[in-house]
Amino acid sequence: MPCLVLEDIVKSCDNNSGGIYGIWINQQDEIASITPTDPSAGAGWSITGITLAGVNLFQNFYIRRNTSNFTEESNIDLVNGSSFVTSTINLMFHRRDAAKSRAIKILGGGQQYLTAIILDANGIYWYFPYLQVSATGEGSGTSRADGSKYSVTLVAENDYLAYEVNMTPVQLQAIGVQ
């Protein structure tokens, strides 16, 4: 079977900013379907709809700017012919308290699969399926200026880079992303 035809990457004149502004997380089991069902099959590599299986909406995990990020690394084995992408999301939550401790414990409970939608600093939403909490950490800090905090790392291994989410604000609000 022949490979896909190569496509251009054109020069962009847009500003490019790093960092993430928001993250919304749900359990993977709550995702009934995405539209199109296979965004990599010539549909522009973007998701135009998400249908939830139940009433549990995406939950906002508030982060401060310049504290959190995501990376995607391709893992390509030329000998075995296997390829996948490791997605890693690093989150930082300021000020330790019981409510945050409980939310983080539930997030990682049972090593469940999670789905996240991230708003990056360029105003683009990204869809990350099949994430799991792989680490939590941090503490009180050493000096008063350090502040107390939590760090949470989510990791997934998927076939593709994250898909762009091209849904209207009304569609996003209907699933809890606002």
Image (tube, grey):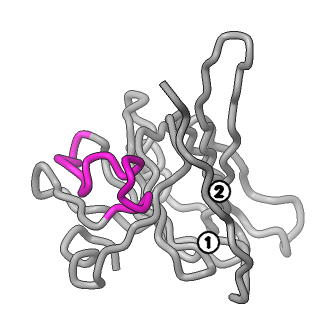
Residue at image coords 51%, 73%: 119
How packed mark 1 is, by other alpha carbons closer than 10 Å (few <14, some 14-19, many 20 or more), is many
Pick the front one: 44 or 83: 44
Q: Is residue 81 left or right of residue 30?
A: right
Name the image quarter holding the C terminus: bottom left
In the displayed structure, would residue 160 be above or below residue 20? above
- What's the distance in space between the residues labelled 2 and 1, CA to CA? 8 Å
Q: Position of residue 62 (x, y in %)?
A: 50, 71
Q: Which residue is mark 2?
A: 70
Q: CB atoms at circles 2 and 1 under 8 Å apart?
A: yes
Q: Position of residue 8 (x, y in %)?
A: 65, 63
In the displayed structure, would residue 109 be above or below residue 114? above
Dot 2: element: strand
The mark nearer the N terminus, 2 or 1, is: 1
Q: Is residue 68 left or right of residue 84?
A: right
Using the image, tell me which numbered label, if any, was put on residue 6: none
Q: Is residue 39 magenta?
A: yes
Dot 1: element: strand
Specify the quadrant of the image occupied by residue 84: top right
Q: Is residue 141 magenta?
A: no
Looking at the image, which residue sits at the far right? Answer: 143
Q: Which residue is mark 1?
A: 20
The magenta segment is 29-47
